[in-house]
Amino acid sequence: MSGGSGADYYYLPNVPFVMFFSNNEVAAGRGFSLHGTYWHNNFGYPMSHGCVNMRIIDAEKLYNWVGPVAEGNVTLSTADNPGTVVTIYGQAPI
Amino acid sequence: MQEGGNKPVPIFASETPISTSSIDVLSPDGKVTLTMKEKKVEAGVVHTFSVSNKEIFSKTLPKDSSLTIPFNAFSPDNKYIFLKKTVLGKVDYFVFPFSEGTEINFSGLFTEKFGSELTIEDATGWGGVDLVVINTQKVSGGKGPSFWFEVPSRSFIRLSHAF
């Protein structure tokens, strides 16, 4: 997983249990996701520009619970294998 | 001594456990379990910490004090934990490196360096494998900057971003 630019550039290989989310306002190409996190342990505080950083044990549980049911390395949601609705509450922290 | 007939009967003073409790905390990657056992004795509370069933350290605190495991206690590589100690209302944070066997009281180090200007408000977790995230308050009032405490060098790095 990589992104940002300049001082915000990041390159984080092998991010586990990645679950991308998007809608008609946030394009899938922006790469926002829920995922496991191995490079920090400061959960509950802003640590990302858009992703939802989770403990690996929590991300694994969620990954195996939500849709679409994973089939191989990359699974896109379809009518037959729909994704789970993601609802985001609150406002982005300053 | 008590009298038992004509023969004195000795009574030995000893730490009498009043009650014990135990909690387990799993590391974020699920690979390591930290266990804290608390045993109340006459002198206070004995806290014993084990990692995956191997005892790493023990600490006795007076009554009316506490030693707690913060939610983000484990470093990302499971080499350190940080803990919060409260004695008579005074809060201290310290890091315990599993490999060294000695605690590092970074609240004390912070006070030595910045005590006239800032106080630690809280330590929230780990910004990297050996960086504890610290939020501060200004002695003069108001929110202070955030810091990283870098464990290997025992140094503080002031951050431009407040957590």
Image (cartoon, coloured by chain):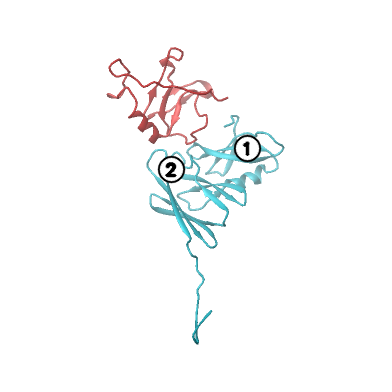
Residue where numbered disc 2 is placed? B78
Farthest residue to the right: give it.
B140
* Residue found 58% across the figure and 49% down from its top: B86
* Helix, strand or loop for disc 2: loop
- Most extreme residue toward the top is A24
Q: Position of residue B133 (x, y in %)?
A: 55, 37
Residue A23, given in percent of the width and then of the height, sits at 42, 15
2 or 1: tag closer to the N-terminus? 2
User: Which chain is tinted red?
Assistant: A
Would you say A76 lies left or right of B146 here?
left
The crowding category of the residue bearing disc 1, from other C-alpha atoms within 10 Å (few below 14, some 14 to 19, many at least 20), is: many
- Residue ID at (45%, 34%): A39
As displayed, is residue A59 above or below residue B139?
A: above
Instruction: Check disc 1 and report its element: helix, strand or loop.
Output: strand
Q: Quadrant of residue A27?
A: top left
Across and down, in percent, residue A87 comes to 44, 22
Cα–Cα gap, marks 2 and 1:
25 Å
Give the labeled residue for mark 1: B136
> Residue B72: which disc?
none
Quadrant assignment for the N terminus of chain A = top left
Residue A51 drawn above or below residue B95: above
Q: Nearer the viewer, mark 2 or mark 1?
A: 1
- Chain identifier of the residue bearing label 1 in the image: B
Q: Left of B149 or right of it: where is A27?
A: left
Pick the residue in front: A80 or A34.
Answer: A80
Q: Residue at x 45, y 15 (%)?
A: A26
Q: Which chain does the cyan colour mark?
A: B
Under mark 1, the amino acid is Thr
